Amino acid sequence: MDRELIGEVIKSLQQGKRCALATIIQVKGSAPREAGTRMLISADGHIQGTVGGGCAEAAIRQRGLMVLDRGRPEIYHLDLTADTAEDEGMVCGGVMDVFIEPLEVIGEC
């Protein structure tokens, strides 16, 4: 995780803000970003970092907000195969699995 994103996670948690961390854990085919790429999603919908942009990123952002509401992590399967990608005007055509986890402060360090 890059320093800027780590700093944003720490800042959000110190301020008591609810947020979720989305991490691409698997990519098959042509996808906008590689496994290990992360994005922070705040409860107000603000994002830090990117998992590829466009409708794929918007879908992951929305799913992150749902994860925050439920308070449970999940693996989100995002299909960007040719038909879906073409319908949305994307150049990618792969599949991404994204682990989305709510972050919270547990006790004091």
Image (tube, rainbow, N blue to C red):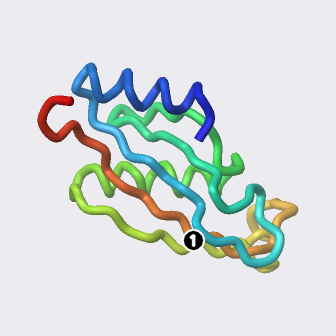
Give the SS element for disc 1. strand
Q: For this view, does 15 lie left or right of residue 36?
A: left
Residue 21 in the image, given as x and y percentages of width and height: 44, 47
**83 vs 35: above or below:** below
Q: Is residue 43 or residue 99 the one in the foreground?
A: 99
Residue 63 in the image, given as x and y percentages of width and height: 42, 58
**Residue beneath the point at 27% across and 22% down:** 14
Tag count in the figure?
A: 1
Q: Quadrant of residue 82?
A: bottom right
**7 vs 30: above or below:** above
- In the rendered image, the quadrant that contains the N terminus is top right
| Crowd class of label 1 (few under 14; some 14 to 19; many from 20; radius 10 Å) | some
**80 vs 47: above or below:** below
Residue 45 in the image, given as x and y percentages of width and height: 42, 36
Q: Is residue 46 or residue 74 the one in the foreground?
A: 74
**Residue beneath the point at 68% across and 75% down:** 95
**Residue beneath the point at 77% across and 69% down:** 85
Q: Is residue 72 or residue 14 the one in the foreground?
A: 14
Which residue is tagged 1? Answer: 97
Going by the numbered disc 1, the residue's amino acid type is Asp
